[in-house]
Amino acid sequence: MFQRKRDGAAAPADGASWTYGYTNGARSLWAPDLSYHNGRYSMYYAASTFGSNHSAIFLATSPSGDPGTWTNRGLVVSSQSSDDYNAIDPNLTVDAQGRWWLAFGSFWSGIKLVAINPSTGLRSDNAIVSIAGRGGGPIEAPFIFRHGAYYYLCVSFDYCCRGASSTYRIMVGRSTSVTGPYYDRNGVAMTSGGGTEILAGHGSIHGPGGEGVFTDTDHDILDYHYYADDGTPLLGINWLGYDSAGWPYAF
């Protein structure tokens, strides 16, 4: 399975009107997650406004991924101001049994997981599983991938979108079940603030986060965004290695 986050011209030129209730009428949509399964591309994306959890994740599909070929498949999951979670930053994962799951979340009570119907790409039930959190602190951008006997949950700690002052860093935990519980290297549950650092700011790399992982012919690849010294947003790509205990590291 090849899976990564990317941008693309998928929405209609006049905007995705079905999202306006979550964007206050703006055309800006966030954090697309694109994957290819069962002969079609599925793109999950978020609609919200900065700092609000009146948010929603929608699905669009395409047979080719080309502009003009995308069909709106509707609402997947939403959150309101009365909820303790935020429905942004989606990531689709398919487990070893072929079951589909969507991870999402930002701040509030943290990262959540819902089951997805592979036929429709929409939710299969109303259950929401909590898989990571920092007691309301900054955590977002989940990405789950499988390597060997483990599912690895990557998240971004701290703050994005502040140019060279951004403090984003990429953290990871692992579990033998896609639904968790996920623990870091020290045995701390990710639902209790745990996480083992993979990559943080260094030198002229500021605030790496918003990560994804995909498998190439010779390595797993970590992709992410970061800021240069002058605040320019850039794409970062690193190989992932695994130490003798199976913990990933970037190099």
Image: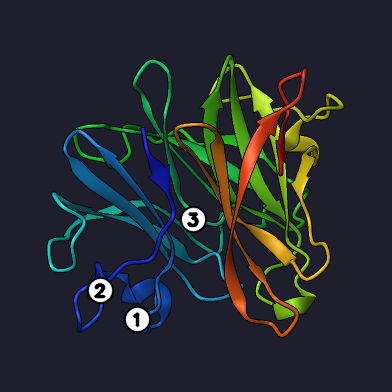
Residue at numbered disc 3: 87
What distance separates the C-alpha of mark 2 from that of mark 3?
17 Å
Instruction: Quadrant for the C terminus, please.
Output: top right
The three-letter code of the residue at mark 2 reads: Ala
Q: Secondary structure at mark 1?
A: loop
For badge 1, the amino acid type reads Arg
Give the CA distance from mark 1 to mark 3: 17 Å
Q: Quadrant of residue 20?
A: bottom left
In the displayed structure, 53 sits above or below 155; it is below
Q: Is residue 175 above or below residue 24?
A: above
- Residue 27 tag number: 1
Amino acid type of the residue that numbered disc 3 sits on in the rendered structure: Ala
Question: Mark 2 packing: few (<14 Cα in 10 Å), some, or many (20+)?
Answer: some
Which residue is identified by label 2? 16
The answer to whether residue 160 is left or right of residue 129 is right
Viewer-nearest of discs 2 and 3: 2
